[in-house]
């Protein structure tokens, strides 16, 4: 049973990452269109943009890292916790 639950959690984590990548690509495609890029210039811009957005999304705040460490989380549970923590911080900063 634990194996099934672990497999489900890992699958959800992979799906979330795929959704983020698709969202980042769509945003980058829009930016490239706004800049009126085409061909190789557009492809290069989109590739770099997606890479840059992925790196920024994965950088966790020290507070979220500390929280995950205190809770002794690892793997998919840690990733999920950090993602939620970062979203909560972002939402709190907009208020």
Image (cartoon, rainbow, N blue to C red):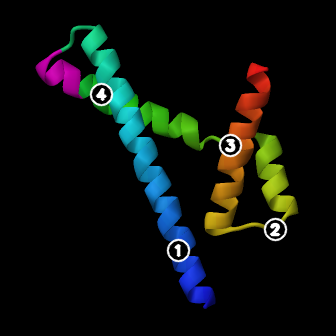
Q: Residue at x 71, y 55 (%)?
A: 81
Mark earlier in primary sequence (1, 4):
1
Indicate yes or no whether the magenta region holds residue 7: no
Which sits in the foreground, 11 or 50? 11
Look at 65% across and 48% down and name the residue there. 83
Number of numbered discs on residues: 4
Q: Earlier in the sequence, mark 3 or mark 4?
A: 4
Mark nearest the camera among 3 and 1 is 1
Question: What is the number of the mark on residue 60?
Answer: 3
The alpha-carbon separation of the residues under discs 3 and 4 comes to: 24 Å
Q: Disc 2 to disc 3, how far (Cα)?
A: 16 Å
Measured Cα–Cα span from mark 2 to mark 1: 20 Å
Label pair 4/2, CB-CB below 8 angstroms: no
Give the residue displayed 40% in from the left and 43% down from the top: 21
Q: How many other residues sit within 10 Å of disc 2, few (<14), some (14-19) or many (≥20)?
A: few
Residue found at the very far right of the displayed protein: 70
Dot 3: few (<14), some (14–19), or many (≥20) neighbours within 10 Å?
A: some
Image height of 39 relative to 48, above or below: above
In x, y percent, where is residue 68?
A: 79, 57
Return the residue nearer the eye: 76 or 12.
12
Question: 27 and 1: which one is in front?
Answer: 1
How far apart, in angstroms, are the residues tagged by discs 3 and 1? Answer: 24 Å
Residue wearing tag 4: 46
Q: List the residue tagged with mark 1.
A: 8
Query: In the rendered image, which residue does mark 2 sit on?
Result: 72
Q: Is residue 72 above or below residue 87?
A: below
Q: For the magenta stretch, what is the residue range?
A: 38-43
Q: Earlier in the sequence, mark 4 or mark 2?
A: 4
Position of residue 51 in the picture relative to residue 44 (left or right): right
Quarter placement of the C terminus: top right
- For discs 2 and 1, the disc positioned in front in the rendered view: 1
Secondary structure at numbered mark 2: loop
């Amino acid at each position: 049973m634990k194996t099934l639950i672990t497999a489900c959690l890992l699958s959800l984590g992979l799906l979330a990452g795929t959704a983020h990548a698709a969202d980042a690509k769509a945003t980058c495609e829009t930016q490239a269109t706004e800049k009126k890029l085409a061909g190789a210039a557009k492809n290069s811009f989109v590739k770099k943009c997606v890479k840059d957005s992925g790196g920024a999304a994965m950088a966790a705040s020290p507070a979220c890292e500390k929280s995950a460490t205190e809770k002794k989380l690892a793997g998919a549970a840690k990733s999920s916790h950090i993602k939620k923590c970062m979203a909560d911080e972002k939402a709190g900063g907009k208020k």
